[in-house]
Image (spheres, rainbow, N blue to C red):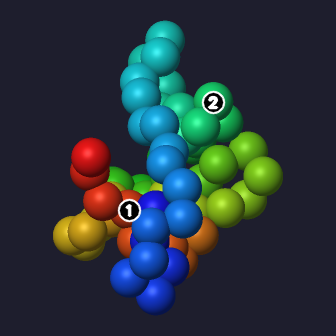
Amino acid sequence: MLFENVSYGSAQVEIKNGYLYFNDGKCREHGPGLFFRYDGETLDFRRSPPVFANQILRKK
């Protein structure tokens, strides 16, 4: 994940049992490409690059 163009961590996004998980947190789809994690944070794949909690995600 990037904050002000500085990498400060990594995240794992995967599909398990038909659900999207972000760092082991199950997500619920709100609309095409827009997900909410169990704690209310947003995961947005509607644009490129995708964002999580307003932080840019980049693929390793």
Q: Please tell me whether mark 2 sits on a helix, a strand or a loop.
A: loop
Q: Is residue 51 visible?
A: no
Residue type, numbered disc 1: Leu
- Label number found at residue 24: 2
Position above or below: 39 against 53: above
Q: Is residue 23 visible?
A: yes
Q: How many marks?
A: 2
Instruction: Answer with left or right where residue 50 lies relative to residue 39.
Output: left
Could you tell me residue 21's position as x and y percent?
53, 33
Choose top left, top right, bottom left or bottom right for residue 47: bottom left
Closest to the observer, 31 or 14: 14
Position above or below: 10 against 24: below
Could you tell me residue 22's position as x and y percent?
54, 40
Report the residue at 47% width, 16% height from top.
16
Residue type, numbered disc 2: Asp
Instruction: Answer with left or right where residue 27 lies relative to residue 59.
Output: right
Report the residue at 44% width, 77% height from top.
6
Q: Which residue is mark 1?
A: 57
What is the C-alpha distance between the residues marked 2 and 1? 16 Å
Farthest left residue?
48
Could you tell me residue 53's position as x and y percent?
59, 70
Closest to the observer, 1 or 39: 1
